[in-house]
């Protein structure tokens, strides 16, 4: 059996489950991280996307994508996982049917012009799945539009899915966990000390993104330590 972690962006699966990925790979399991929004945009960027590129320090999209893929591969190597990168566009690059930019913020409901995207994502995922693969998907805590759409896509695929909490959005909106898990059963997966610290090292590989996710290294370590120490691991949920 392969464990397939479906990651909306180049960091989400590692942020949310890096320690567990490490433990699974160390035990001999095959673990793969499939990241959906690794497409390279063509033409100009929206003002919103330009501002984000400036923050990340990569004004040219191709340079940013290359850097982020390199970060993702480094993080996966540390954890013992393989990576698969799909070429769908991040929401900051997507245009609607009239050519207008769909998003000038990311923590909002999906635009109606993205209605067909979950089916397209589901088809791309299904084409690579083996019958015994175990899918793992994030809940969509924080309501990032890409997280919402990727979850919808996974739920179109007719096979069991396990869910995990979106990190760091759970840290920012802890009250959102309960509504997502109301009709689900949790199972705790233990992560030892080596797994925890390797998890942090893998998260640190995403250098281009860290300043937008955490105030500083100390805050990042503190939040992860608090999250991990509650169960000495993390929980995955399955529908009742």
Image (tube, helix red, strand yellow):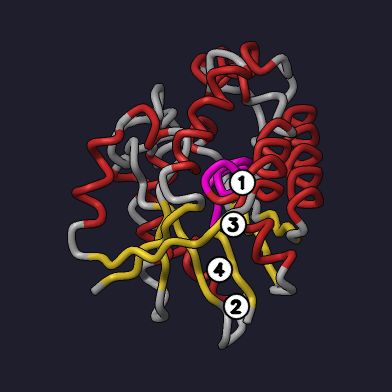
Q: Is residue 96 left or right of residue 240?
A: right
Q: Nearer the viewer, mark 1 or mark 4?
A: 1
Look at mark 4 in the image and give the residue it sits on. 125
Marks 4 & 2, CB-CB < 8 Å contact? yes
Q: Earlier in the sequence, mark 1 or mark 4?
A: 1
Label 2, residues with CA under 10 Å away: few <14, some 14-19, many ≥20: few
Expressed as whole percent of the image width and height from the top left, the position of residue 120 reads 48, 62
Residue occupying the point 23% across, 74% down: 240
Vertical placement of residue 12 versus 184, above or below = above
Expressed as whole percent of the image width and height from the top left, the position of residue 22 reads 68, 56
Per the rendering, the mark at residue 20 is: 3
Expressed as whole percent of the image width and height from the top left, the position of residue 230 reads 41, 44
Residue occupying the point 65% across, 51% down: 87
The verdict on residue 12 being magenta is: yes
Residue 65 vs residue 30, the one in the foreground: 30
Look at mark 2 in the image and give the residue it sits on. 129
Distance Cα–Cα, label 4 vs label 2:
7 Å
């Amino acid at each position: 059996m392969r464990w397939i972690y479906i990651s909306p962006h180049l960091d989400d699966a590692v942020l949310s489950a890096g320690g567990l990925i490490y433990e699974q790979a160390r035990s001999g399991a095959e673990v793969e991280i499939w990241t959906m929004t690794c497409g390279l945009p063509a033409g100009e960027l929206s003002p919103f996307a330009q501002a984000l590129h400036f923050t990340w320090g990569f004004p040219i999209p191709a340079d940013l994508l290359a850097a982020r893929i390199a970060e993702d591969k480094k993080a996966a190597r540390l954890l013992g996982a393989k990576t698969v990168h799909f070429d769908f566009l991040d929401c900051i690059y997507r245009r609607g049917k009239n050519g207008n930019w769909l998003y000038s913020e990311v923590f909002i409901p999906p635009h109606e012009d993205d209605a067909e995207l979950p089916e397209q994502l589901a088809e791309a995922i299904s084409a690579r799945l083996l019958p015994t693969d175990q899918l793992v998907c994030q809940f969509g805590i924080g309501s990032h539009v890409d997280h919402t759409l990727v979850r919808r896509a996974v739920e179109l695929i007719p096979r069991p899915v396990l869910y995990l909490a979106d990190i760091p959005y759970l840290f920012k909106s802890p009250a959102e966990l309960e509504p997502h898990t109301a009709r689900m059963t949790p199972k705790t997966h233990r992560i030892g000390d080596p797994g925890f610290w390797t998890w942090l090292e893998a998260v640190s590989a995403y250098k281009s993104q860290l300043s937008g996710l955490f105030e500083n290294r100390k805050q990042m370590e503190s939040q992860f330590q608090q999250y991990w120490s509650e169960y000495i691991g993390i929980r995955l949920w399955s529908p009742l």
